[in-house]
Amino acid sequence: MKTTAAVLVELNTPLELAELEIPALKAGQVLVEIAFSGVCRTQLLECRGHRGEDPYLPHCLGHEGSGIVREVGTDVAKCKSGDQVILSWMKGFGHDVPRTVYNWNGRGVNAGGVTSFARHVVVSENRIVVIRRPIELRDAAFLGCAVPTGAGAVFNTAAVRPGQSLAVFGTGGIGLFSVMAAASIPATPIIAIDVNQDRLEAARKSGATHLIDASATDSVAAIRMICPEGVDFAIEATGRPSVMQQSLAAVRCRGGVAVVVGNARHGERIEIDPAELNQGKRLLGTWGGDNQPDRDFPHYEELVARGTMNLQPLMSEAYPLSQVNQALDDLECGRVVRPIIDMNL
């Protein structure tokens, strides 16, 4: 059996569409027919060579998606043929099979435990979660990375409680879900900071109580006008080191917490004034919102099914797989918040 996939052959070059031969499933692997795949900024950084040397070229890409199970390998207990599933780079329960090699006219093409820029993919059992709620597959694709990373940073990493204050730096896909998660608690105030007016408007519709245009004002000073002592929590979702510093500066002394979610380019560094830490502030990292997929994804499904998390602000016109490079360009230029690939187009 063959599949059409978008393959990264060389860094900083367009992805190539290739007809790949699908290998026989190993124990613990699952064959999934992809319905939708999100296009994440992390994948953009990888394509553009901003994540450093890549020893696995050529390889498949995509780490959030949705689809239907078509075949299961031996020892797979988590799903069965016909199940609708979420695909994620986050590891859950089940077998961990880290590598697949497809055949491309005699040339090996590498893939990790999960990929989604293809019509059919071989996935490790622990990278899928069976969908249990009545949600659309298009919505489910975002539950593989965007929703759990943004919401998990609020629910799990920061553990925000009702009435606590929160600032979200960057209201793209990840930041919007941080805003929605905070609004569901509810946190107050919820301050959204961005340079893009459309994204700020999306944040307002998602539950932000205050908006700050970072292109027109000093973000930290503007936050202090709203919360003179600083906010309880700040979520950084831009990947810019200067903004990571701002997020720490924006939280209150003696207990304020800044959570860095965004991925910086390879080699970039941040400078921290030790006095910030001496004042009792904390700077935390997060591994994709610190989720346990089998525990947390059903909760996110429920929030989407109830309408508590509205995915419409992310929904742009879908791209066919043949336009994956256009999707990457549009994401890079800010023309869309979170591109999505529809494999039926």
Image (cartoon, rainbow, N blue to C red):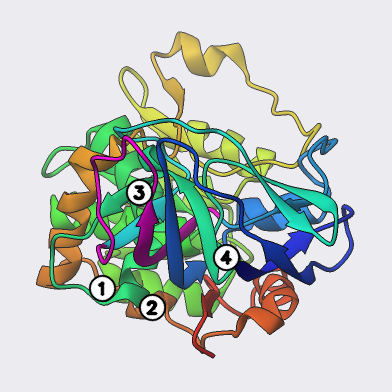
| Chain part drawn in magenta | 63-83
Residue 173 disc label: none
Q: Which residue is mark 2?
A: 313
Cα separation between marks 3 and 1:
23 Å
Q: Which residue is mark 1?
A: 310
| Quarter containing the C terminus | bottom right
Q: Amino acid at mark 1?
A: Asn
Tell me if 222 is positioned left or right of 320 in this view.
left
| Quarter containing the N terminus | bottom right
Q: Which residue is mark 4?
A: 39
Tell me if 248 is positioned left or right of 298 in this view.
right
Cα separation between marks 3 and 2:
25 Å
Q: Secondary structure at mark 3?
A: strand
**Closer to the camera: disc 3 or disc 2?**
3
Of callouts 3 and 4, which one flags the residue occurring earlier in the amino acid sequence?
4
Q: Amino acid at mark 2?
A: Pro
Q: Quadrant location of residue 331?
A: bottom right
**Closer to the camera: disc 3 or disc 1?**
3
- Residue at 50%, 31% in the rendered image: 248
